[in-house]
Each structure stands twice: as C-alpha cells, then as structure tokens.
Image (spheres, grey):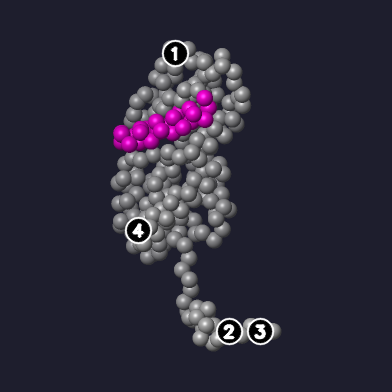
Amino acid sequence: MTASIPLSTRSRLVSPPGRRRPGPPALVLVAHGSRDPRALGTVRSLMARVRELRPGLPVHLGHIELNEPLLTDTLAALGTSDAVLVPLLLSRGYHVRQDIPEMAAAAAARTRLAAPLGPHPLLVETLHARLLEAGWPTAMDDAARRETAVVLAAAGSRDPDSATDTRRTARLLAARLGVPVVPAYASAATPTVPTALRALAARGRHRVAVASYFTAPGRFATQCAHTAPWIASAPLGAHEAMARLVLHRYDQSMSTRSAEAA
C-alpha cells in the first residue's frame, strides 16, 4: 500500500533533473617529497589508509618538490573544485607559511589550508607505538628510568615556531613515557642529535632511544637513527593514528569554514 503523500510535498523530495547534491571537498595530502624511494611508498600507504577510514571522500596527493605528482599538477587537475590541503608536515615553518599557500593561490581550485599535523596527541600515540616496535620496554622500574631518556629527532627549521611545536611534542611524549625527552635536529636548528646525546650522557642518561620524528624514511631519518646508542624507532609512516590525524585536520578545517560561513 503506497503512503498518501501530497504531490506538492513529493515534488520537494525529488532533486530537480540534472542537479546533484555536491560532494565533500577533496582532501589533498601535501607531502614534502624525497629522493628516497621509500618515502613515496610510505605516503601512498598513508593515503590508502585515509581512504579506508573515509570511503567516498576524494583523496589526492601532491608534493612540494622532488616527487610526482607535484602539488601544482594535482591542483590543476582539480580544476575549480573545492579542496582542503593537509600538509604532511609536523610543525609550522616556511613550507606551511609560504610554499603551499603560493602554490594554492596560483591554482583555479578553491582551497583551504589545514594546520600541519603537529603537535597533536595522535602523533605521540604513533611515536609511542614505533618505540614499542623498536624494543622500548612496556614496564620500567625507578632505577631504569633514572638512566633512560629519549631524543626526539626532527628535521629542523630556522622558523622559531617550528621549534616551539617540536618542543611541545617532546613534552607530550615525556608525559607518556615518564622519562626526559629532548628535541634535537638533523639540520638548520640546535641542538643536533649527537649534541643532545652527549648532554644526556653527561647527566647519567646512558640508555637513550632516538625517536624518529619524520613522516617517512629519508636521508635525515637514516642519519639520526645511526646515532642511537640504544634503540631507534622507525619514522611515523602509515600508522593508523596518522591516518586518523589527517582526517582530523581535514574535519577541523571544514568546521572552521562552517563557523565562518555562519
């Protein structure tokens, strides 16, 4: 038996011919790019995880340099569509302030730039998981804690806000682990990773792990890992928490746009 619905009401329930409800803005992962072939594979794996978590959301990839597709080409392919750019970068810095906005401004696509991934508790969740994979103990007595520490090895930047963000992540990780966590850098900032290791040894911290604060394998991540006197964790990579963080930054940007429109 067909329910009796007035014709005027039924006509409002049917979309006019040729008109479809617009889909969500595309999510564009913005990776830095690397000459290390493992980096591209890692970013593609992360993109696949994001798609698994949010079926139906268009997800694309664009690189700032060194790898294809370049961000400029990805944006050109989107035409005049809406897109949210999520940088796969762990802090503020030149790429977030200058490079990505300039590329976006030159494109026809209507874009919004999300915040970089860090700092955020989901990054700490990933760092902790990678340390456990590398051999970090699940339990530690007081004597072990007094000689244990972590160096949070990051790429480094001349932008002071980048160092501020990295220090905040180090504090969050220290609270999670219960031992000192010292941020150190592969380039462009101090202290370097070897300097931080020497300073910790002088304080009696002889069991020191190097936590890789890099999104993907590369030259800097490899160099930092080789300095570890104890264990070194793998880069953050395509961990499930990283995919959740990418979608969080996307949703955060969308919520900000909705609030601005309201």
Q: Amino acid at mark 2?
A: Ile
Query: Disc 2 marks which residue?
Result: 5
Mark 1 or mark 4: name the one nearer the start of the chain. 1
Q: Dots 1 and 4: beta carbons under 8 Å?
A: no
Estimate how packed mark 2 is, as few (under 14), some (14 to 19) or many (20 or more) residues with alpha carbons within 10 Å: few
Q: What residue did someone put label 4 on?
A: 260
**Residue at disc 4, secondary structure:** helix
Tag on residue 214? none
Q: Amino acid at mark 1?
A: Arg
In the image, taking residue 257 as reference, residue 58 lies left or right, namely: right
Vertical placement of residue 79 versus 41, above or below? below
Label 1 neighbour load within 10 Å: few <14, some 14-19, many 20+: few
Q: Which residues are magenta?
A: 152-178
Q: Is residue 164 magenta?
A: yes
* CA–CA distance in space, label 1 to label 4: 50 Å
Point out which mark residue 203 bears. Answer: 1
Q: Nearer the viewer's eye, disc 1 or disc 4?
A: 4
Which is the main secondary structure of the residues drawn in magenta? helix
Q: CA distance from mark 3 to mark 1?
A: 80 Å
